Image: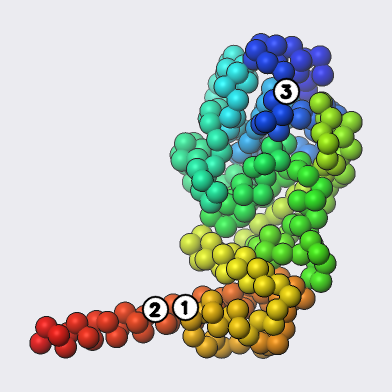
């Protein structure tokens, strides 16, 4: 794996130092790099998606384990360096996509999706902080072929993914992550593990998908949006917000009542409530469509 001196040399090849605007804080603790790779279970059977490979420290470690890596790098200079280094030493197992990993807030870059070609993959990355949450939520809800994520991100973001009901960190992110999979805290990363040192504390997080969950990305996305809307009224009783969302009365699940507040409910209960709202919304839409069709038939007869 790369030393700090080697990282500096590769940045010189790129023609610039670390870019704060792109969240370029390079993980230089080689033991922690190995820990992330080990926890992710990277081997010669693993297809890895890496976002923000930088100079390729983590990438090189995974390639040495025999993994196949599809990496997405926004920095033009570092992309050039990666092609000159890892692209030449591992041409059959390293694919580089230059550009933003996201196309908007809720969709992956089509070039990345095409490179993965629908195959099961694992996200392993030292994530740029600004991209972490939207990227991970997109992979959770839109890409069931993503079997897990093992990443370094801000400690506060890990707290939100792993939060329990009744805490201030608990929210839609917690519900989505814990309903569709299992969140694991791997390690805390003090600022001195990075170069340059970030102004925030970081942590390693693992997330493993529950493959018993039905693989229906469109529905997962709708349910996630319902949950996010409900948390906008986190301290209010659920009766009114639910009626407004559903546009009709719903069949309330046994574990929740209109007088409950969403911030105190378990993730599974909230997901069940979101399913009830989604079903009520679909029924109301079907009824409106049927009524409109009947009116049109009457007009044309």
Q: Is residue 116 visible?
A: no
Q: Quadrant of the N terminus?
A: top right
Q: How is the image coloured?
A: rainbow
Mark 3 to mark 1 CA distance (whole Å): 49 Å
Mark 3 surroundings within 10 Å by alpha-carbon count, few (fewer than 14), some (14 through 19), many (20 or more): some
Q: Residue at x 59, y 74 (%)?
A: 274
Q: Which residue is mark 3?
A: 18
Q: Is residue 14 above or below residue 279?
A: above
> 183 or 159, which lies in front?
159
Q: Element at badge 3?
A: loop
Q: Which residue is mark 1?
A: 281
Q: Element at badge 1?
A: helix
Q: Position of residue 247 (x, y in %)?
A: 48, 81
Mark 2 to mark 1 CA distance (whole Å): 6 Å
Q: Position of residue 292 (x, y in %)?
A: 27, 82
Mark 3 to mark 2 CA distance (whole Å): 52 Å
Q: Residue at x 65, y 12 (%)?
A: 15
Give whichever of discs 3 and 1 has the lower sequence position: 3
> 288 or 194, which lies in front?
288
Mark 2 surroundings within 10 Å by alpha-carbon count, few (fewer than 14), some (14 through 19), many (20 or more): few
Mark 1 surroundings within 10 Å by alpha-carbon count, few (fewer than 14), some (14 through 19), many (20 or more): some
Q: Are marks 2 and 1 in contact (CB under 8 Å)?
A: yes
Q: Is residue 273 above or below residue 164?
A: below
Q: Which residue is mark 2?
A: 285
> 93 or 180, which lies in front?
180
Q: Is residue 246 above or below residue 73?
A: below
Q: Is residue 26 visible?
A: yes
Q: Element at badge 2?
A: helix
Give whichever of discs 3 and 2 has the lower sequence position: 3
């Amino acid at each position: 794996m790369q030393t700090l001196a080697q990282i500096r040399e590769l940045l010189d090849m790129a023609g610039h130092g670390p870019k704060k605007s792109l969240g370029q804080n390079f993980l230089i603790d080689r033991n922690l790099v190995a820990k992330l790779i080990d926890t992710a279970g990277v081997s010669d059977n693993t297809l890895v998606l890496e976002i923000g490979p930088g100079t390729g420290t983590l990438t090189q470690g995974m390639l040495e384990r025999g993994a196949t890596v599809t990496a997405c790098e926004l920095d033009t200079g570092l992309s050039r360096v990666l092609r000159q280094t890892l692209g030449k030493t591992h041409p059959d197992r390293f694919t580089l996509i230059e550009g933003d990993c996201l196309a908007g807030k809720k969709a992956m870059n089509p070039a990345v999706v095409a490179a993965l070609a629908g195959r099961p993959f694992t996200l392993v990355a030292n994530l740029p902080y600004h991209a972490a949450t939207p990227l991970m939520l997109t992979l959770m809800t839109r890409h069931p072929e993503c079997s897990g994520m093992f990443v370094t991100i801000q400690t506060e973001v890990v707290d939100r993914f792993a939060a329990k009901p009744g805490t201030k960190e608990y929210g839609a992110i917690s519900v989505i992550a814990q309903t569709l999979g299992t969140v694991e805290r791997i390690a805390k990363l003090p600022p001195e593990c990075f170069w340059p040192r970030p102004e925030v504390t970081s942590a390693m997080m693992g997330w493993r998908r529950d493959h018993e969950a039905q693989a229906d990305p469109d529905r997962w996305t709708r349910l996630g949006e319902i949950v996010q809307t409900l948390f906008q009224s986190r301290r209010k009783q659920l009766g009114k917000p639910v009626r407004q969302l559903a546009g009709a009365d719903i069949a309330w699940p046994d574990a929740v009542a209109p007088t409950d507040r969403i911030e105190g409910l378990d993730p599974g209960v909230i997901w069940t409530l979101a399913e009830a709202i989604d079903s009520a919304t679909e029924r109301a839409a079907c009824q409106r469509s049927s009524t409109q069709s009947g009116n049109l038939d009457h007009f044309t007869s």
